[in-house]
Image: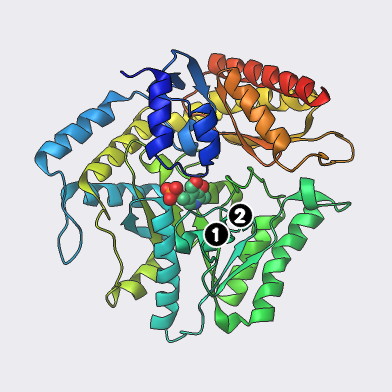
Amino acid sequence: HLPTAELQALDAAHHMHPFTTGNELAERGARVITRAEGVYLTDSEGNEILDGMAGLWCVNIGYGRHELADVAARQMRELPYYNTFFMTTHAPVIALAKEIASLAPSHLNQVFFAGSGSEANDTNIRMVRTYWAMKGKPSKSIIISRKNAYHGSSVGSGSLGGMTPMHEQGGLPIPDIHHIDQPYWWAEGGDATPEDFGLARAQDLEKAILAMGEDRVAAFIAEPIQGAGGVIIPPATYWPEIQRICDKYEILLIADEVICGFGRTGNWFGSETVGIKPDIMTIAKGLSSGYQPIGGSIVSDEVADVINSGEFNHGYTYSGHPVASAVALENLRILQEENVLGHVRDVAMPALHEVWHGLNDHPLVGETTIVGMMGSLALTPDKDSRAKFAMDAGTAGYMTRERCFANNLIMRHVYDRMVISPPLVITPEEITTLGKRARQALDEAYTQMKD
Ligand code: PLP
């Protein structure tokens, strides 16, 4: 119950924040969030903020679901912790693994649990290399990923990611990770049609495999729809070609479903939306709607059989944590019993798409793009030429994000793209409010940029 300014000063003095500069924290103070209900956050000054990002793309069922708190409390009283190493297990992790396998595509039936998406992708690096080594092909160790991808912040997952500012800190990437270009037509497509561009960017994978040798490439990893890179939706030609290439050269396909999974794209998994058959899917975020930290890798029967034929020397203290597992299971129950995907497809998606594309007429907006409940728009000084701003990349996005904040809307910016990913349970009325606040923020940013 300290006053906001005092909390902010203590926060700046003792709390190191991810992806934040210390100076900004000290000068302005972070916004202190105190409560949340449905799609709204409340801050320490009593503002009600519409969370257009579902936290960090994770609170799929919305805030304030007391059932999850009840399940957590019950599980903590009964078995607050036990591990899954050395031949032990427990009911919550068994039930969760079974449920995930029943929701996943039919060839994916085993789950290796982790505490987060980053940890799960670290698991994947070791798992695919171990798989090929156990199949007698230890030279297959290279993992191909994409520039501007985000796969997490640990050393392994940060290496899989293709973000230059992350690679510049701490000596990333680790060896044998290779990045190809992303299928970002609006910014990089030039005069090509989206279809030709999508095909060409997929064929970059084939070129990379041939250049390095197919006997050296273990896997290709990508998000079905790239999220943190700015919600980059690939042209329809992209994914079928990637699947063809992976099949042809026996390259394992890892779909990072950390954002796309559990309803975000309008299906249970983004892989269904883009029509691919991955060998491994990374999951986290929407698995528990963010109520508990949990992630994992859903593994194909083929890969699991090979890995399980020996000992995989890998695991985390919190792999399959009983409280996190019980909460995730309750979250999956709510998603299914309340038909949240039906709400997404029939109600939320049509309303959000209409509101989102409605922003296309704004003078600052170059394109609006959206799949399911994840969308983005490009800020531009000139719609027709798809031009970039003369000011530093990200400045226009930052200004717009700040105007959203001032209008009690959370929208994220990725350089000069604005990104949206609200809770899946958002109502049409709330979507209307989101649209009005977004337009107001764009108007204010536009005025500010002209001044
Ligand atoms: N993979 C993707 C696609 C993500 O978007 C993220 C986080 O945003 C991660 C992995 C990392 O997950 P975590 O932050 O739980 O480690």
- The image shows residue 397 at horizontal and vertical percentages of 69, 34
Q: Amino acid at mark 1?
A: Gln
Extreme residue toward the left, this view? 78
**Image side of residue 395 versus residue 1, left or right:** right
Residue 10 appearing in the image: yes
Q: Which is more toward the observer, 353 or 417?
A: 417
Instruction: Give the colour scheme of this rendering.
Output: rainbow
For the point 72% across and 27% down, the residue is: 357
If the image is split into quadrants, where does the N terminus sit?
top left
Q: Secondary structure at mark 1?
A: loop
Q: Which is more toward the observer, 317 or 422?
A: 317
Q: How packed is label 1: few (under 14 Cα within 10 Å), some, or many (20 or more)?
A: few
**Image side of residue 65 versus residue 268, left or right:** left
Q: Amino acid at mark 2?
A: Pro
Residue under numbered circle 1: 169
Which label was assigned to residue 165? 2
Which label was assigned to residue 82? none
- The image shows residue 403 at horizontal and vertical percentages of 65, 23
**Image side of residue 240 versus residue 50, left or right:** right
For the point 85% across and 41% down, the residue is: 387
- The image shows residue 114 at horizontal and vertical percentages of 33, 55
Vertical arrangement, residue 436 with respect to residue 384, above or below? above
Distance from the alpha carbon under mark 2 to that under mark 1 = 7 Å
Q: How many marks overall?
A: 2
Image marks 2 and 1: residues in contact by CB distance under 8 Å: yes
